[in-house]
Image (cartoon, rainbow, N blue to C red):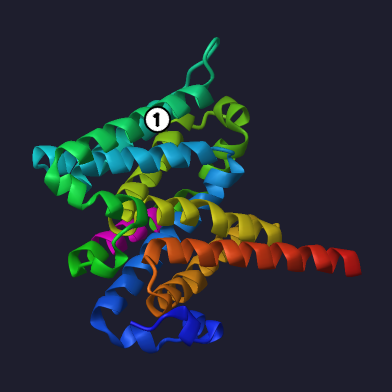
């Protein structure tokens, strides 16, 4: 496999020749589906200021995978179940007096991380998949995983297209929505269910780093460029669609782990957009 020092950076990022290989096409399809749905949901995560919850849910999904491998369950089913339970617990209405919700999310994160490490260390099968949980295994994506991600993406996009206005209303003015008779608990449940389902399946295929980066960075980039919510949502998905192929190509030519390489391209694009936006503001 060629190394980056022997390959021009522009070619390494934008060459589509690598996708003639079947396993790289599978990685591309899986990455595009996982990245797009996470980027779409990430706009709501960033705007609602629940970024840390996204980290906790990603780690809960990792714990589900480790638990599934440890006890012999299907890892994706265990990951989805645990992620959904965690998401729904934090979506329930309640008042925290001494302990804030953020502190409880932090507690859930460190506990899930600690138990995951223990299960991975005690189970040879889980230990063999330990690195994949963090950096992902996009290059080993199967046809069945792609079909699962496509089904999840379809459900999420159709749900949000159908309930878009209600999600926005409940997300940013819950008290008014409740006073107008909207079933805010139902819409909160639907949002967190979509988020938990997407994170659990995407994490199993792409890893924690890829999932969390796709939740946060495309939304940040799109928010730097647009103001209307529809454009922000479309922009975030477009960022994922552009970045994932570039990251996979970069990882192939530089002989790097695929998930972290995609994260690096995300980060570089955010810096470029931010610098360009700042320069444009100065020149106006």
Q: Provide the residue span drawn in magenta.
A: 148-157
Mark 1: secondary structure: helix
Q: Does 118 appear in magenta?
A: no
Residue 131 appears in view:
yes
Q: Quadrant of the N terminus?
A: bottom left
Residue marked by disc 1: 110
Q: Quadrant of residue 86?
A: top left
Q: Quadrant of residue 29?
A: bottom left
Residue in view at x 40 percent, y 32 percent: 109
Task: Give the vertical position of 241 relative to 162 (above or below).
Answer: below
Left or right of 158 on screen, residue 24 = left
Residue in view at x 29 percent, y 53 percent: 131
Number of callouts in the render?
1
Q: Camera-side residue: 255 or 41?
A: 255
Q: Residues within 10 Å of mark 1 (few under 14, many from 20)?
A: some
**Most extreme residue toward the front, as rendered?**
5
Q: Quadrant of the C terminus?
A: bottom right
**Most extreme residue toward the top, as rendered?**
98
């Amino acid at each position: 496999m060629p190394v980056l020092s022997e390959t021009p950076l522009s070619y390494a990022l934008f060459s589509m020749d690598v996708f003639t290989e079947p396993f790289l096409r599978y990685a591309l399809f899986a990455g595009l589906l996982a990245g797009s749905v996470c980027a779409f949901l990430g706009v709501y995560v960033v705007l609602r200021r629940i970024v840390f919850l996204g980290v906790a849910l990603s780690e809960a999904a990792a714990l589900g995978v480790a638990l599934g491998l440890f006890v012999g369950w299907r890892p994706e089913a265990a990951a989805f179940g645990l992620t959904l339970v965690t998401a729904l617990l934090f979506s329930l209405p309640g008042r925290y007096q001494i302990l804030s919700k953020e502190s409880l999310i932090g507690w859930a994160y460190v506990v899930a991380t600690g138990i995951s490490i223990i299960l991975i260390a005690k189970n040879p099968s889980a230990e063999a998949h330990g690195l994949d949980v963090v950096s992902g295994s996009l290059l080993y994506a199967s046809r069945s995983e792609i079909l699962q991600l496509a089904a999840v993406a379809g459900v999420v996009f159709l749900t949000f297209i159908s309930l878009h206005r209600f999600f926005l209303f409940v997300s940013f003015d819950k008290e008014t929505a409740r006073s107008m008779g909207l079933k805010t608990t139902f819409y909160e449940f639907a949002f967190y269910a979509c988020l938990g389902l997407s994170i659990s399946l995407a994490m199993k295929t792409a890893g924690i780093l890829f999932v969390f980066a796709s939740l946060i960075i495309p939304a940040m980039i799109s928010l730097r460029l647009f103001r209307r919510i529809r454009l922000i949502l479309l922009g975030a998905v477009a960022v994922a669609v552009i970045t994932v192929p570039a990251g996979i190509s970069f990882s192939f030519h530089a002989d790097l782990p695929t998930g972290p390489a995609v994260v690096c391209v995300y980060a570089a694009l955010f810096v470029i957009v931010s610098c360009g936006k700042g320069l444009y503001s100065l020149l106006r």
